[in-house]
Amino acid sequence: MDMNARVLLIEDEANIAEAMRFILTRDGWAVDTHGDGATAMKKLRETRPDVLVLDVMLPGKSGYEVLDDVRADHEFAALPVLVLTARGQEAERHSALARGASLFMTKPFSNAEMLENLRQLAGA
Amino acid sequence: LKKRRNVVNLGPINLAEGKPMARLALIGTRVRDRRLLLGIKQSDLARDAGISPAYLNLIEHNRRRIGPDLGAKLAGLLEVEPAALTEGAEGALFDMLREASAGVEPGIAPEIDLIEEFVGRYPGWAGLLAARQRQIVQLSRSIEGLSERMAQDPFLATALHEVLTVITSVRSTSAILTETEDIEPEWQMRFLRNIHDDSLRLTTASAGLAAYLDQTRAPETGLASPQEEVEAWLEAEDYHFAGLERSGAVNLEGVLQGAADLVSAAGRELALDHLRTYQGDVQALPLAALLPALGAYGANPVALAKALGRPMPLIFRRLASLPPDHLPAGLGLVGCDGAGTLTFRRAAAGFLLPRFGAACSLWPLYEALVMPGTPIRRIIETVGRGAGARFAVYAWCDRDYPGGFDGPAVSRAWMLIVPLASAGDDSLRALEPRLVGASCRICPKADCVARREPSILT
């Protein structure tokens, strides 16, 4: 993976965030993590990632609301966003994509699948 | 039991070959629905069928099979034509075809007057059409139950989310440990600790989920929650506890002994709460005072409250817990908390209550909820299943401040439901009836101004 690529992971589950940070770092990504929906936009402006990974069930503000904020901000209108959720129904997928998600993954997922999707989103 | 001629088809109960009835899950529920529609007490039906109320209660909650003899007896007592209970019989066939013709798309006009000719000339096609209609009725009922449960079950959704989240963590972490050959020892230890923590969390989450699902019978068989356990228990007891009507100390735990429906600790706790309220109500208004007033004023809670000098909710609850031989025919009572959730349900004959979630917001119960201390009196007419039945309803809400000046307000509303024929209040008849349903999801009223969500029936 291109060593310059940066990913911001908004995920409130500490163990998932730690595992993701480990595998992404080993894959060559610069990784930032954040666990709160309400302050996610602030973190996004600070870190300015190449790809955003966004969990749906977050404290403070849901991942969908954060996604709305991301797409409403012209600076991030084209930012690749991968949405993670434990609900895999078609309606959920449709909702995520309609709100501007670039990709949608359901939990549980494999590490290889996550890496492949992120590489694809970063254009690597 | 009084005889009526308004025969309703209960569906495909197979009595013809003398086999134990198939589709156990449907039959008990239908027996119960039909009994409630006719306003027959569970104890009366049990007595006439020659079985105990407790056994009938188990049957109605689909926890006991019905043999062909008992099935035939129950069918007779529930005034269902024997033919209607036998698959393929002509009577049932005609009923099903008529039912199918009632639910067609606009613009299609089946020739109702030619049904007999149709059956005679094309028995195969007629049987097929009736079978499809029967299937639609069954599926509609199943969908009602499942949709309500899935839509209104936040515990299930939250518990599943918790399990999936922990599994995600375990899967990613264990893959790192097995696939990363040169992992540093400190990372290895850290991830092993995470897996250990996750396994404990998964144990708790899955145990909670298993316990919850264990209480949940098959989708249509009820008793999915502590509230439903209490409801089944109260119904089996006819909502009356003779042992609590006498003065003197009573061991409330003892009253619960042998209550087969109370399977969970939460259910038993709710049942104890109910008994404590019951005990307090008895002290505030003993039967010795209530029964003479009932004789004088009938099921008119306004007149009873005035004559006895007692608050309206107390009158409501005491009326709904009268001994079966004194209970005004078909009387029901519902109660809700400040969030509108039904916390007490005694079905009035012919008045359908939602099995899960919120009820119809047009119920006067909810008018009372926003006007505490204000008596509400209405005539309501039902739509949906059992449409057209009229009831006198009386609603009242108490608002309490148990935390004092700075504490939150705690509201509790009640609605007494009296079939119009049993209401001892002629002045009610001048009131314009209001059309109400059970809940939006199973209500067919298309132009309802208070609709909360689309109906699954339309």
Image: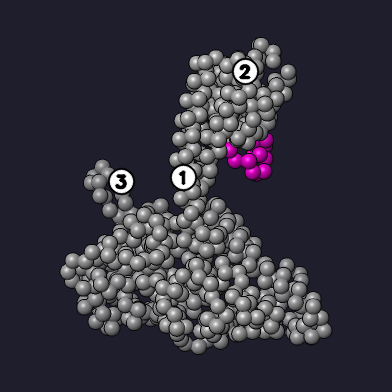
Marks 1 and 2, how far apart at CA: 35 Å
Q: Position of residue B130 (x, y in %)?
A: 72, 75
Vertically, is B310 above or below B87? above
A98 in the magenta segment = yes
Residue placed at 53% from the left, 43% from the top? B160
Q: Quadrant of the C terminus of chain B?
A: bottom right
Determine the secondary structure under disc 3: loop
User: Seen in the image, is B446 located left or right of residue B380?
Assistant: right
Is residue B172 among what the camera can see? yes
Q: Please tell me if label 3 and label 1 are on a single chain.
A: yes
Q: Position of residue B424 (x, y in %)?
A: 36, 80
| Amino acid identity at mark 3 | Pro
Per the image, the residue denoted by label 1 is B207
Res B413 quadrant in image: bottom left
Res B376 quadrant in image: bottom left
| Amino acid identity at mark 1 | Ala
Range of magenta residues: A86-99
- Name the front one of labels 1 and 2: 2
Query: How dense is the environment of label 1, judged by Cα within 10 Å: few (below 14), some, or many (20 and up)?
Result: few
Residue placed at 57% from the left, 57% from the top? B146
Residue that lies at the very extreme toward the top in this rendered image: A3
Marks 3 and 1, how far apart at CA: 34 Å
Q: Please tell me if label 1 and label 2 are on a single chain.
A: yes
User: Seen in the image, is B148 located left or right of residue A112?
Assistant: left
Callout 1: residue from which chain?
Answer: B
Majority secondary structure in the magenta region: helix
In terms of sequence position, does the residue under pointer 3 or pointer 2 come before the other?
2
Res A76 quadrant in image: top right
User: Any mark on residue B408, and which?
Assistant: 3
| Amino acid identity at mark 2 | Glu
Determine the secondary structure under disc 1: helix
